Image (cartoon, grey):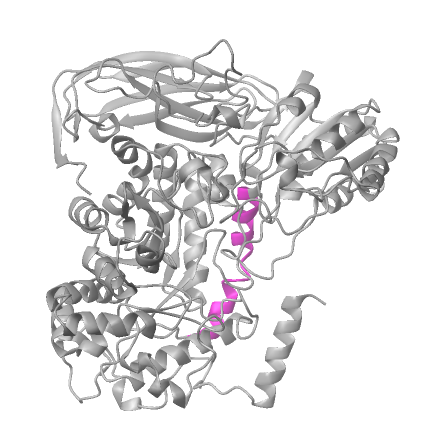
C-alpha cells in the first residue's frame, strides 16, 4: 500500500466519521458561513461596515484601491503585511484556525503563508486535493472574516520540479529541462505548474530559479537552467509568462549574484561572489532583467550573499535602484530564509538584529520569510517606525507592493477556490503526464557513441546487465521543492518491462554513490572494504555473462543540491573502479549518468562504448533510457553546461573572453564536452544562410534564416544554435554569444528553414562608461550544432550607434 493511498484512505475515513468540518454545501461548492452578509454578487464587504468602500470595489483602478486601503490601516496591520507565516507544520501548529489565533500577531493579518500543508514535513491535510483546498479555504476565510479589514492572504509555495504538492505532475530538475533547449516545453511546464499550484489553493509559486551557474562545484547547479545568460533568460522567460498567465505570481530566485560563491562553496559560505561588476551585469543579471522587463514577474527572492561587501538583502542598489527603477519591478521581494538576520549575524554590517530589519526594509525588501514566528520580525519593525528610524512613507511603499500583488491575483474579490472537487481533476490529467514524459525524453543527451554502438539490436542481445548505484534508485528526481508522493520506475524495471522475457536482464548494485570514507576520499583515495569488494565482484561476475553492461552512475541528492558543494567533479566512491573491473571482462559498457552537475569523466570517455547524460530526469527518465539504448527514441538534448576535464581548469564555461581557454604548455587543455554539445543517431546538414539586411542602423532588426536537413536514416531532433561575435568593440566582449536557438524535429530526409530575429537588445553591450547600447561595426553570425560545431557563418554591419538610457555605476 503506497503512502499516498494510505493518506487518501485515512482522510476519507475522517471525513466520513465527521471529524473534519468544512463550510461546504451543494455540489462541492465552497460557501463561507460565518458572516454571510459580507458576500455580495460582485464584491465582498471586507471591513464588514455594510457598504462598498473603494478598496472593496472591483471596478476601481488597483492603485486607487491600494491608496484607500492604506489610509484605513493601522501600524499593526501594515507591519503584518510584511511578514511570512510559515504554514503547518513548520511554524503553524494547526492545519485549521483555532481560537488562539486571536491572540497571535497575525490577528491583524499577514502578508503570506508559505508551504501550508504542502506535504513537505507532514502528509496531514495534503491529500486528496479537495481536502487540501478546503483547508486553504478555511484559513483564508479566517483572515477575510475574522480580521478587521479582511485583507486576504497570499498563499506561497515552491515549484521548480512542478507544483510542490502531493500528487502533482513531476518534471526533471531544471538542469535537465535546460538540456532540452525547448522553449515550448518550458512554457508547458510552467503552465502545468501554475494550474496545479492554483488548483491546490496557492496563489504564488517560487519558480523559476534564474541563477546562471558558472561553477560546477556549486551544489545548486542542479536547479539551474544552465551556465549561459541567454539560455537561462529565454527558458526562464517562458516559465514566468506561463505561470503568470494563470494569475499565479512567479517569484523568481535568487536575486542577485547568488550562484557564484567563492570556490563554488555553498552552505554557510554563500558570500563573496567571485565576479566583477561588469560581468555580473552581463552574465548573472540578464535572466532577472528579462523576467522583470519582459515577463513582468511580480515576485523575487533576495539572496543570502553580499556583493562587494554589501549584503544584497540590505542593498538599496540591488533592491531599489536596479530592481525597481531600472528593471521596472512592480511586485514584492521576499527574503531568502535567514538572509535578513545574516546582515547582522554573519555579514556583521549591522550592530544588532533590529538594525538589520531597518536596513533590509529601507533597502527594498518587502516580506521577511524564514522558519520562525513572524512576530520576531514584526515587533522590531513596529519599534523602528514608532521611534522614527524607519519612515511611515517607506513602510507604506513596502506594504503597497504586497497589496498590489494581492489585488493582481484577484484574491480581494475571489479569495476562495469555489469548487474543491474540480481541483482534484487537475491532478489526474493524462495530457499533463504527456508533457512530463516529453520533458524526461528531451533532457537526454548523448555524449559518446563510438562506432555507432547504440542503438543495440535486440536480436543480437541475449543477456544484459544493468548495474551501478543509480540502477534501482527511484528518488533522484524527488526534491523538497517539487511534487510529493510520486512513484516511478527504476532503470532496471524499465528495461525488464521493455524487454519482457526476450532478453535476460540481470542486476547488480556494484557500489554505492560514495564510499565509507567520503568526502575525505576525494583527496585521499581509500581501498574498498570486504563488503564493498563483494558488491563490485558480484557485478563483475554477472558482467561476464552479459552481452552488454549498462552502468547507471553519477550522483544522488545527498551530494548535489542546496548546501552540497564539492571539491572534485570525479565520479565519487568506487564508481570508476567498477567501470574498470567490468571492462576487464571484455563486456562493452554503456555509461548512463544521473547527476546534477558536470562531471570530469575523462577515463570513462576514453573507454566506454557510449555515454548518455540523463541528469535527474523526472518520472519517465528510466523508460527514456531504455528506449534510447534500443533505438526507439533518438536523443536530441544538448549540454547546457561545459564539462571540464579537471577542477583545476575552473572557471571553464561559456561564454568566455578571448584566449581564456587557450592552451598552455604545462596544463590540461580544452574541455571534455563543450557548451551546446550533444550527439544524435542521425545526422544534420546546415545550408543556405541568409542575413537581411547586410547593413542596418542600430535601431533596426536583423533577420537570419538557415536550412537544416536530416541527412540520416532516422527521425530526430536538432537544436539549431545562433551565436554572434562583435568583431571590434570598446571593451572586451565574449568570443561567442548565444543569441538564438530552436529545437526542431525532422523526419529522415526532411528539410526545415529556421528563422531568427536579432533585435538591438541582442547586440547591446556595456561600454566603457557602463552604459548599455549598440556600437557600430561588423558582427559575425555563426550557426551550428554546438558552440564549437559551427556549420554556417556570415557577417552584417551596424552603421550607427544606439544608447538605451540606462547606466550602471559601481556605487552599491
Q: Quadrant of the C terminus?
A: top left
Foreground residue among 28 and 305:
305
Which image quarter is the N terminus in? Answer: bottom right
Percent x, y for residue 34?
A: 35, 91
Residue plotted at (56% across, 52% down)? 433
Query: What is the magenta range?
Result: 419-439
Q: Residue 728 appears in which quarter of the rendering?
A: top left
- Give the image location of residue 58, x and y in percent: 19, 72
Residue drawn at (69%, 25%), measured in percent from left and top? 454
Kindly tell me whether residue 759 is visible in this rendering. yes
Task: Residue 664 in the image: state x and y as whole percent.
Answer: 47, 11
Whether residue 123 is situated above or below residue 512 in the rendered picture: below
Q: Does 684 appear in magenta?
A: no
Q: From the viewer's perspective, is residue 303 above or below residue 567? A: below
Q: How many labels does the image show?
A: 0
Q: Above or below — where is 723 with respect to 324?
A: above
Locate residue 636, reporting x and y percent.
54, 30
Looking at this view, is 475 or 462 the one in front?
475
Q: In this view, does 564 lie above or below 122?
A: above
Nearer to me, 10 or 73 = 73
Amino acid at each position: 500500500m503506497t503512502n499516498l493511498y494510505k493518506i487518501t484512505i485515512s482522510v476519507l475515513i475522517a471525513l466520513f466519521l465527521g471529524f473534519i468540518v468544512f463550510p461546504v454545501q451543494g455540489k462541492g461548492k465552497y460557501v463561507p458561513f460565518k458572516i454571510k452578509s459580507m458576500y455580495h454578487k460582485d464584491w465582498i464587504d471586507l471591513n464588514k461596515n455594510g457598504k462598498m468602500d473603494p478598496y472593496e470595489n472591483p471596478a476601481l483602478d488597483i492603485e486607487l484601491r491600494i491608496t484607500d486601503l492604506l489610509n484605513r490601516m493601522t501600524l499593526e496591520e501594515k507591519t503584518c503585511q510584511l511578514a511570512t507565516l510559515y504554514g503547518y507544520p513548520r511554524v503553524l501548529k494547526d492545519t485549521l484556525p483555532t481560537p488562539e489565533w486571536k491572540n497571535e500577531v497575525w490577528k491583524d493579518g499577514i502578508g503570506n503563508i508559505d508551504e501550508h500543508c504542502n506535504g513537505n514535513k507532514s502528509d496531514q491535510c495534503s491529500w486528496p486535493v479537495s481536502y487540501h483546498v478546503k483547508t486553504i479555504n478555511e484559513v483564508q476565510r479566517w483572515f477575510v472574516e475574522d480580521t478587521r479589514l479582511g485583507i486576504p492572504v497570499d498563499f506561497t509555495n515552491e515549484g521548480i520540479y512542478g507544483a510542490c504538492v502531493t500528487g502533482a505532475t513531476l518534471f526533471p530538475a531544471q538542469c535537465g529541462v535546460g538540456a532540452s533547449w525547448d522553449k515550448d516545453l518550458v512554457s508547458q511546464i510552467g503552465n502545468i505548474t501554475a494550474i496545479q499550484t492554483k488548483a491546490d489553493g496557492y496563489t504564488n509559486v517560487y519558480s523559476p530559479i534564474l541563477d546562471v551557474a558558472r561553477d560546477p562545484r556549486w551544489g545548486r547547479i542542479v536547479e539551474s537552467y544552465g551556465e549561459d545568460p541567454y539560455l537561462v533568460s529565454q527558458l526562464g522567460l517562458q516559465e514566468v509568462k506561463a505561470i503568470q498567465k494563470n494569475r499565479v505570481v512567479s517569484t523568481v530566485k535568487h536575486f542577485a549574484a547568488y550562484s557564484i560563491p567563492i570556490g563554488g562553496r555553498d552552505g554557510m559560505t554563500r558570500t563573496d561572489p567571485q565576479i566583477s561588476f561588469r560581468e555580473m551585469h552581463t552574465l548573472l543579471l540578464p535572466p532577472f532583467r528579462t523576467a522583470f522587463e519582459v515577463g513582468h514577474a511580480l515576485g523575487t527572492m533576495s539572496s543570502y550573499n553580499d556583493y562587494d561587501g554589501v549584503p544584497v538583502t540590505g542593498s538599496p542598489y540591488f533592491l531599489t535602484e536596479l530592481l525597481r527603477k531600472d528593471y521596472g519591478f512592480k511586485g514584492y521581494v521576499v527574503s531568502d530564509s535567514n538572509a535578513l538576520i545574516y546582515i547582522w549575524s554573519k555579514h556583521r554590517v549591522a550592530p544588532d538584529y533590529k538594525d538589520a530589519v531597518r536596513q533590509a526594509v529601507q533597502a527594498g525588501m518587502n516580506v521577511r520569510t524564514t522558519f520562525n514566528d513572524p512576530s520576531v520580525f514584526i515587533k522590531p519593525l513596529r519599534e523602528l517606525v514608532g521611534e522614527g528610524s524607519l519612515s511611515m512613507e517607506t513602510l507604506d511603499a513596502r506594504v503597497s507592493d504586497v497589496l498590489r500583488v494581492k489585488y493582481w491575483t484577484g484574491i480581494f474579490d475571489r479569495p476562495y477556490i469555489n469548487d474543491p472537487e474540480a481541483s482534484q481533476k487537475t491532478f489526474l490529467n493524462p495530457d499533463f503526464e504527456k508533457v512530463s514524459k516529453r520533458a524526461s525524453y528531451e533532457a537526454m543527451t548523448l555524449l559518446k557513441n563510438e562506432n555507432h554502438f547504440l542503438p543495440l539490436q535486440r536480436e543480437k542481445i541475449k543477456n544484459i546487465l544493468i548495474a551501478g548505484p543509480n540502477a534501482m534508485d527511484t528518488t533522484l528526481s524527488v526534491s523538497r521543492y517539487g511534487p510529493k508522493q510520486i512513484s516511478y520506475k527504476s532503470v532496471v524495471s524499465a528495461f525488464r518491462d521493455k524487454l519482457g522475457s526476450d532478453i535476460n536482464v540481470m542486476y547488480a548494485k556494484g557500489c554505492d554513490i560514495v564510499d565509507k570514507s567520503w568526502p575525505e576520499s576525494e583527496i585521499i583515495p581509500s581501498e574498498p572494504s570486504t563488503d564493498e569488494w563483494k558488491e563490485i565482484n558480484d557485478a563483475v561476475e554477472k558482467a561476464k555473462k552479459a552481452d552488454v553492461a549498462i552502468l547507471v552512475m553519477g550522483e544522488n541528492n545527498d551530494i548535489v543540491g542546496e548546501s552540497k558543494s564539492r571539491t572534485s567533479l570525479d565520479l565519487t566512491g568506487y564508481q570508476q573502479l567498477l567501470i574498470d573491473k567490468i571492462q576487464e571482462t571484455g563486456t562493452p559498457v554503456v555509461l548512463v549518468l544521473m547527476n546534477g552537475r558536470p562531471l570530469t569523466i575523462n577515463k570513462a570517455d576514453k573507454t566506454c562504448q557510449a555515454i548518455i547524460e540523463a541528469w535527474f530526469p523526472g518520472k519517465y527518465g528510466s523508460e527514456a533510457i531504455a528506449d534510447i539504448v534500443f533505438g526507439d527514441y533518438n536523443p536530441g538534448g544538448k549540454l547546457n553546461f561545459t564539462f571540464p576535464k579537471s577542477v583545476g581548469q575552473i572557471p571553464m564555461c561559456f561564454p568566455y573572453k578571448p584566449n581564456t581557454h587557450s592552451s598552455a604548455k604545462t596544463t590540461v587543455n580544452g574541455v571534455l564536452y563543450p557548451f551546446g554539445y550533444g550527439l544524435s543517431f542521425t545526422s544534420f546538414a546546415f545550408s543556405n544562410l541568409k542575413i537581411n539586411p547586410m547593413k542596418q542602423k542600430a535601431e533596426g532588426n536583423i533577420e537570419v534564416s538557415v536550412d537544416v536537413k536530416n541527412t540520416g536514416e532516422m527521425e530526430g531532433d536538432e537544436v539549431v544554435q545562433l551565436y554572434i561575435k562583435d568583431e571590434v568593440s570598446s571593451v572586451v566582449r565574449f568570443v561567442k554569444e548565444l543569441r538564438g536557438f530552436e529545437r526542431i524535429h525532422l523526419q529522415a530526409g526532411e528539410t526545415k528553414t529556421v528563422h531568427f530575429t536579432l533585435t538591438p537588445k541582442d547586440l547591446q553591450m556595456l561600454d566603457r562608461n557602463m552604459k548599455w547600447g549598440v556600437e557600430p561595426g561588423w558582427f559575425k553570425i555563426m550557426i551550428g550544432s554546438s558552440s564549437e560545431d559551427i556549420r554556417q557563418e556570415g557577417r552584417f554591419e551596424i552603421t550607427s550607434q544606439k544608447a538605451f538610457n540606462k547606466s550602471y555605476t559601481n556605487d552599491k
